[in-house]
Image (spheres, rainbow, N blue to C red):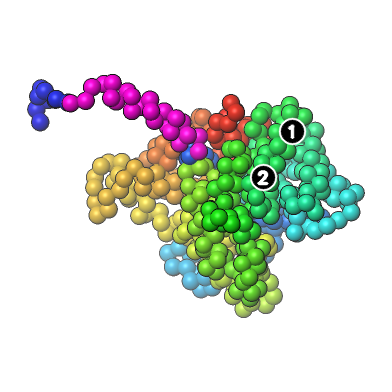
Amino acid sequence: MAQNETVRTSLGDAVRQDIGASLAAVDAELARRYPGDPGTRQPVHTVYVPADALTADTVRTWGDRALAALDEHAPDAERLAEVLGLPSELAAPVHDRVRAKLRREPVEDLRIDFEDGYGPRPDAEEDAAAARAARIVAGAVADGTAPPYVGIRMKGMEAAVRDRGIRTLDVFLTGLTEAGGLPGGLVLTLPKVTFPQQVAAFVRLAEEFEKARGLPAGRLGFEIQIETTQSVLGPDGTATVARLIDAAEGRVTGLHYGTFDYSAACGVSPAYQSMDHPVADHAKAVMQVAAAGTGVRLSDGSTNVLPVGPGPRVHEAWRLHYGLVRRSLARAYYQGWDMHPAQLPTRYAAVYAFYREGLDAAAARLAAYVAKAGGDVLDEPATARALSGHLLRGLDCGALDFAEVAAATGLTRADLDALAGRPAAAARPPCVTRSGPAPAGAGPDVPVRRTIRRGRTGRGP
């Protein structure tokens, strides 16, 4: 059509304006409920440590034990490739990067467990453990040894343990606040959720603590563990996990699948309780759809087959763990649980192999999309967002270096952030702890709310 050709229409401006006005409330509701990914780093795992086993050097001890297991059972790249079936071209970079990661940052997310891993204790003992955990976390944040994300799993909102869980949370948060403030990477985990009202009660706790301590409204966020059947499917057939997210009023940051509690609730025999059982796949599929677009992130569960004992036994457990982690990654569960230091080598080997083997294809497709060069795959903006997100996750965890990503894509970090919908580097909070640089996340005392509720806003890790 010639540029000077007259374009004719049949509808007046009033029609367009009336339709826009009629959909204004829907537009606002979509923005409130589906703000999109928070655009910050997501840890690749959560390490659970019973509260009574926590020490000031827990993270370093886990790293040292993981390195010792790697040195004993896969001391070089060739041996690791043989055990895990890695392609030869990936063996050396994966092995080298795993060793470097275990030295530099062995744990990305540490959860101090006051629930199943700790059990019932006398009140005075749990009080002391919660206060001690706060002191240790505050000390690690102050000296720069804390992992990017750290927090507690309290006892849940069931009647039998509710009061104890609330008190433990209060003691821990009070201790952190009085020791210098809440770390930016603070994560709280609420287990055994069955009804939205329990989530709403946790929101009330968070609000009351914020008021009591003069914190910004929305500062405290939390994860929900999905480990009961009621949290997935209600008696009327509705997907209740979506109701849990709604009841959190913008505070929920993650949904964590609980492999063994959920499997047991479905009647699965212990020998068959696993992350790849059909009941697990169903629950996680419901979680995935319910969380899509909300900014709430997903975490898979764990395997209880530990890599301990003689070499063949360790290798067998490593292959199982490696395969389960790779399976989760392929299904877009980018986080999981690790329960033993010797699981860290295969956690990072699986994560690094996943991102490194996908580098060339993702980079080529993204470069072609930006250059509008076409090719054998026709990508759309949503796919470009996923491609850049893939590369950014690889950069966040250390699987990729920016120099190689830039060389493969021709893009800057700002370009990748923009394509993925992440905030620009200058707009990101500077660190996730109060001392020293760390990957992108919320800064100290930054509200975690992702949506507008009752006039409050915020973002978090």
Sequence-wise first label, 1 or 2: 2
Quadrant including the N terminus: top left
Total marks in image: 2
Q: Residue at x 45, y 63 (%)?
A: 90
Q: Residue at x 57, y 46 (%)?
A: 243
236 over 406 or under it: above or below:
below
Q: Is residue 31 left or right of residue 113?
A: left
Q: Which mark is residue 173?
A: none
385 over 272 or under it: above or below:
above
- What's the distance in space between the residues labelled 1 and 2, CA to CA? 16 Å
Q: Position of residue 337 (x, y in %)?
A: 62, 58
Reply yes or no: does residue 31 show up in magenta.
yes
- Residue pointed to by mark 1: 208
Q: Hey, which quadrant is residue 345 in on the image?
A: bottom right
The residues colored magenta run: 10-33
Question: Which amino acid lies under the numbered mark 1 shown in the image of this protein?
Answer: Glu
Nearer the observer, 434 or 244: 244
- Residue pointed to by mark 2: 197
The main secondary structure of the magenta stretch is helix
Nearer the observer, 44 or 352: 44
Among all residues in the image, which is located at the extreme front?
A: 236
- Disc 1 vs disc 2: which is toward the camera? 2
Reply yes or no: does residue 206 show up in magenta.
no
Q: Residue at x 41, y 36 (%)?
A: 418
Question: Which amino acid lies under the numbered mark 2 shown in the image of this protein?
Answer: Gln
Q: Position of residue 217 (x, y in %)?
A: 66, 29
